[in-house]
Amino acid sequence: MCKAVVIMEASKGQERSIMKVRIELDPSMDEPEILIRAPRLTQELAQLQESILRQKLVPLAFYKERSEYFLDLANILFFETDGEKIFGHTKDEAYEVKQKLYELEELLPITFCRISKSTIVNAKQIYSLEKSFSGNSTVNFYQTHKQVHVSRRYYQVLKERLNEMRQQNEKEISWDPLDPFGSFGNCTRLFYKMGN
């Protein structure tokens, strides 16, 4: 096994970020594997993952009746098994995909998260998460009646992913006193408090 280590440094304003990139050559492997280790999910890591995936992936194909569609993954609410088939759901439609759920987990960007044995959800599309006394929870999406259930086993993973995304969004939002109600991305509620 041969190893090469590169340390990359980047600065953004006064923020300074160091990233180690390590390449290990292992002749016993069949295909390359990229593992990203970090203390928390950041927008930069999500973009890095998406960029890496775009290098190798062919667009994911969706099927309905005799037609093939190439949809933007940002519009997909969730992927779910229905019998032997896997469907990708948008707010209005459901399209069959040929991949298995475990294959989709490896292909999809980090915003997608497994929430049950039969469902992968797009965390960016979640409007609310309702917890029930029985242990299962329900995910509601923006501008649709569609819902999916989160099993107890995956609930904490989903909550962590949502919290990481929320923290990242808060860092990206900046308040301009000259434009107090400017663009705030996908925020569903804005709390504005004036002090004395």
Image (spheres, rainbow, N blue to C red):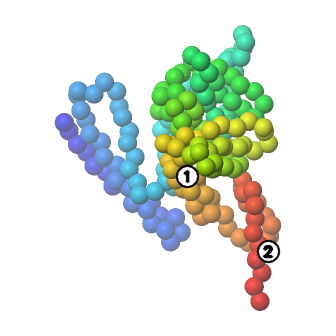
Question: Residue shown at 34%/53% (left/top)?
Answer: 20
Name of the residue lying farthest toward the top? 66
Distance of label 1 from label 2 (alpha carbons):
35 Å
Question: Is residue 132 visible in the rendered structure shown here?
Answer: yes
Q: Which mark is residue 159?
A: 1
Question: Residue shown at 49%/68% (left/top)?
Answer: 15
Front-most of residues 108 and 123: 123
Q: Which residue is mark 2?
A: 178
Q: Quadrant of the N terminus?
A: top left
Q: How many marks?
A: 2
Q: Position of residue 5 (x, y in %)?
A: 27, 49
Q: Position of residue 69 (x, y in %)?
A: 69, 21
Q: Position of residue 107 (x, y in %)?
A: 50, 32
- Report whether 110 appears left or right of 10: right
Question: Is residue 110 visible in the rendered structure shown here?
Answer: no
The numbered mark, 1 or 2, whose residue comes first in the sequence reads 1
- Report whether 182 appears left or right of 3: right
Which is closer to the viewer, label 1 or label 2? 1
Q: Quadrant of the C terminus?
A: bottom right
- Quadrant position of residue 31: top left
